[in-house]
Image (cartoon, coloured by chain):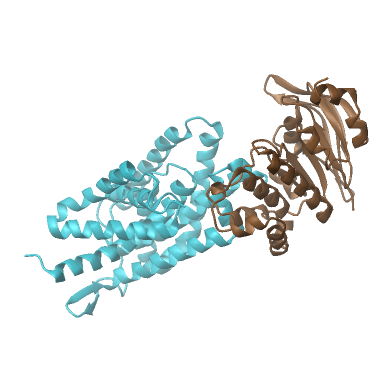
Amino acid sequence: MFSFELLFEAVVFGLLVGCFYAAISLGLSIAFGLLDVPHIAHAAFLVLAAYMTFLLGSYGLDPLVAAVLIVIPFFFFGVLVYRFYYEAFEKRGADAGVRGIAFFFGIAFLVQVFLSMKFGLDQRTVSAPYIGRSLELGDMRIPWRLIVVLCVAIALTVGLKLYLSKTFQGRAIRAVAQDAWALRIVGANPVLTKQWAFGIATAAAAIGGALLIIVSPVEPSLDRVYIGRTFCVVVLAGLGSMSGTLVAGLILGVIESLVLTMFGASWAPAVAYGLLLLVLAIRPQGLFRQ
Amino acid sequence: MAVKITVQELHAGYGAVQVLHGISIEVRDGETLALLGTNGNGKSTLMKCLIGDVRPNLGQITLEIDGVRLDLAQLSTNQIVDFGISIVPEGRRLFPQLTVEENLQLGAYRKAARAKISENLDYCYDAFSILKEKRHQPAGSMSGGQQQMLAIARALMSSPRILLVDEPSVGLAPIMVSQAIAKIGELKERFGLTVVMAEQNFQEAMRIADRGYVLVHGEIALAAETAAELKNSDLIQQLYLGT
């Protein structure tokens, strides 16, 4: 029953889906990996962005164009969320982490309720020329939508990597969780740096959300499906590494795809949590910790 | 084009614990000023007041820079750095997971330093060849002495007018202390800096200091106008030479 062709196909699809996992995890890699913010509302932000893409799509906009348009409002949304989190928790010091989890859980819940009230519980989709068609390569049919995701994932990873390593603001973002006071003595304000970075993380989530609705239909509670996967990718990567996030996404995608092919679809969702626990037990610093 | 810091009747501390009791000092343009005294007498607290890390309860800290007067007690640390004061902090406070070069690049964060970044980077690599050699390694992987050199170089990357150096000798082997102090003296000449150095190692500090203050229990116990005056004072004999 098991053939080389089947295995090959599973790996190819795993790589493509892995690109998608990487793309939706980049924002979390900044928020949780670089800023130490326990951002468990990240997946809810993805779903929110997917619905905003849907909303703009209903006016006839292509989802990729919609993604570009929602980036700026999401940036400011992220800035506001961080400011609130900072004033209410981080500024007061002790156990910001634990309270922060409760705070972001609440935000995720509010987003879900808002989406249910506004859009109902039905699944929503978008249409675009690359959705529903496939590229035929020999015997394989590769959906165009996954090729679009591949391109966006690589562009986003490279863009963020360059931003974080080549600009003053980017370097400050990578430094802020290591020693906030030391950032002050080089003339940067750590709070504003984190606020700006959280805005960027949320803007990355906006693009991830647009990819989400390009890849599959969305419903308000979809964040549950992705919260484990995104955290798995970020932890596997080693906190805060962008290229590591891409590779970790690919690893998760391929393993999930192989499990799906060999053991059936019902096992696939367990892969992310299994891998997350395994990484935490064996190599908690992740694969690519800088 | 001159800089000057005037500290008047400064009282500061941490919560209920008062550390400084009415300190008045002056930092003059182009000098190397030593803040001396044994541990726990307020040298570091005074440095922290100068860089805006500790807010004074009473008193004034005035920076005059090119004819502009600023009240440092009202400014935050990053604003003070923006006005051209830079610090080599106690404990070095590098970014351990970033590379040596990234630490240096971050040193040039303030707007006025960004234009000179490549010039300053070249100079730092010239002055500290070990940093050039290790520029792609994480800062945290270097030895204590090398990290101290990096902390000094990072402070210089911001093109400061005034360089504060807090306890450069802590945690270093004696040979490294001599090297670090000599380097500070050399860089001061090269950049035309004004240097304020808090140091408990009197002998090492006096190799480059023009004059100094001795702090005892949060007060100025001695203000000496020359290095010779310091060396010959009874207080220094008593504190450091055990007589």
Q: Is residue A64 left or right of residue A167?
A: left
* Observer-nearest of B80 and A211: B80
Q: Nearer the viewer, residue A118 or B92?
A: B92
The brown one among the chains is B
Give the farthest residue toward the left.
A1
State the residue in front, B178 or B169: B178
Image point (66%, 39%), residue name: B173
Q: Position of residue A234 (x, y in %)?
A: 38, 51
Give the percent coordinates (x, y) of residue A75.
Answer: 50, 55
* Depicted A74 relative to depicted B233: above or below: below
The answer to whether any part of residue B212 appears in the image is yes
B229 on left or right of B38: right
Left or right: where A93 falls relative to B173: left
Query: x and y percent of residue A25 in the render?
Result: 38, 54
The residue lying at 30 percent from left, 58 percent from top is A251
Give the total number of marks visible in the rendering: 0
Q: In front here: A279 or B136?
A: B136
Left or right position of A222 against A106 = left
Question: What chain is the cyan one?
Answer: A
From this view, report whether residue A128 is shown above or below residue B227. below
Residue A52 can be seen in this image: no
Residue A251, relative to residue A286: is it above or below?
below
Q: Give the residue at x 40% y 35%.
A: A102
Looking at the image, which residue is at 47% across and 60% down?
A: A71
Instruction: Give x and y (percent) for residue B17.
Output: 69, 20
Q: The N terminus of chain A appears in which quarter of the rendering?
A: bottom left
For residue A131, what is the image quadrant?
bottom left
